[in-house]
Amino acid sequence: MTDVHDIVIIGAGPAGSTLAYFLASNGLDVLLLDKAAFPRDKTCGDALSPRALHVLRKMGLFEPVRRAGFQIEKVAFYSPNGKHVTMAVPAYDNLPNFSVVMPRYKFDNILLEHAVSANAQFQSKVNVIDVMREAESIVGIRADSPDGPIEIRSRFTVIATGAATSLLERAELLAHLPEYSRAARTYYEGVQGLSDTIEFHFDAVPLPGYGWVFPISPTAANVGAGYYAPAGRIPTKKSPRHLLDEFISSSKVSDLLKGARMTAPIKGYPLRFDFPKARIAFPGLGLVGEACGLVNPLTGEGIDYALESAETVAGFLIDVFNSSKSPQYVMEKYTQILQERFLRTFNALIRVRDWYLRPWMLNRYVSAALRNEEVALLLVNIGLGNIDPLKAFSLRNLVRIFWG
Ligand SMILES: Cc1cc2nc3c(=O)[nH]c(=O)nc-3n(C[C@H](O)[C@H](O)[C@H](O)COP(=O)(O)OP(=O)(O)OC[C@H]3O[C@@H](n4cnc5c(N)ncnc54)[C@H](O)[C@@H]3O)c2cc1C
């Protein structure tokens, strides 16, 4: 089978479906491919930050997602010494003052259906195995499909395959093997004592890492744990599954889950946050979402970056598509707009992660947040990815955290 499309997008997660929606609703001929049959599960904490909701608002999906998900009004941080602080999700800028938690099985399908309703074509069970090149440019893809091997040609190709790197490796599109965080999660039902609060626990997993309890209803929750093994330090010998077992049996969490039942197997998956080192575009092809390492290195949130990067790239591709710009120009500009939008924040997040996720620092921070409302606001805004994390390092804020 041979076909030619304006744009072929590989991967129908939040990045791919969002990009497909924006491009198709602007009249481009978009083909979206995924190796999975939808609805499909994706191992995740399922939390949609206010920034993610902000992009969904522009797509006309804010109300449907709010209604279908579980609304979160508060965030709690537990420090390694067991103290905790709970804060309302703040109204920051023009972002909503709440979050939503919704299993990805539901959320990703809502996004995909929205893209299809905007006239994007979708084919499931298509495993893309390589790209096709002509005269130094990428001109389409090769894939295994239920009908056998296929080739599809496109004027521009986008890879939105998340943390999976097999296609990038095979097509020689990976600048380096990325560093990963690893995390695992499961679901519980019949949980007593949940509220409209998401909990981040730095008290029952090795640092740098955390455990979480994210409610998906008044009596059910996504429970998970993850860690980051910095290069040069000895990584923990424990798998994410072991970390999660330990987290679940820690005293606070086991009290919360007493009488509740696990309703899904524990599943682990990597997270890629290497955006500052990633190659983002090639002649004829660009990357979006976690495929170019866009996951918050401090918190592991990636859905918001998937949506934001898709929106950013869509605006550029719509502008450039019918012009006679060279593949080289498009590659350079594509890289530039994503770097302008995210590079400074990512470099800051990496520096802050290496500084913050130490027991004494987290203990200080949570104690200061209990005393001082402005520190509390700073902590919740950093945790939600609302603000530049380097703000925490202003002299004024350091004084508040250490002495105030
Ligand atoms: C345990 C865990 C907890 C997390 N918790 C949160 C959280 O609470 N909030 C948050 O914001 N982020 C969280 N994240 C991060 C978030 O899950 C990802 O960053 C996000 O899913 C990235 O979206 P994406 O569209 O870039 O990729 P994905 O959602 O991974 O989608 C990629 C798609 O590409 C398809 N695909 C892959 N390879 C191919 C191929 N060769 N051919 C065809 N199709 C292919 C896959 O089937 C998939 O559908 C978590 C991650 C993990 C692992």
Image (spheres, helix red, strand yellow):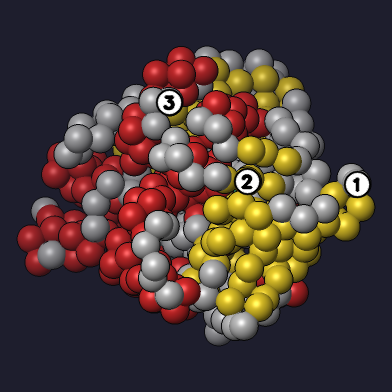
**Residue 395: percent from the left, percent from the top?**
9, 66
Rendering coords of residue 244 (x, y %): 67, 47
Q: Which mark is residue 172?
A: none
- Of 20 and 279, nearer the camera is 20
Q: Tell me which label, 2 or 1, sits earlier in the chain.
A: 2
Quadrant for residue 353, please give it.
Answer: bottom left
For residue 32, side relative to residue 274 (left or right): right
Q: Residue at x 71, y 53 (%)?
A: 3
> Which amino acid is tagged 2?
Leu
Please determine whether, in this image, residue 38 is positioned above or below residue 325.
above
Question: Disc 1 residue type?
Answer: Asp
**Residue 343 placement, left or right of 307:** left
- Rendered view: 208 above or below 262: below
Q: Which residue is mark 1?
A: 147
Residue drawn at 41 percent across, 40 percent down: 26
Is residue 203 visible in the rendered image? The answer is no
Q: Does the numbered disc 3 mark a residue whose Cβ is under 8 Å from ligand 1?
A: no
Q: Position of residue 351 (x, y in %)?
A: 34, 72
Pointer 3 residue? 61
Seen at 52% across and 75% down, the residue is 283
Could you tell me if the residues under marks 1 and 3 are in contact, i.e. CB atoms within 8 Å? no
Give the Cα separation between the discs numbered 3 and 2: 21 Å
Which mark is in front, 3 or 2?
2
Q: Tag on residue 31?
A: 2
Ranked by sequence position, the earlier of labels 1 and 3 is: 3
Number of marks in the rendered image: 3
Q: Observer-nearest residue: 370 or 234?
A: 234
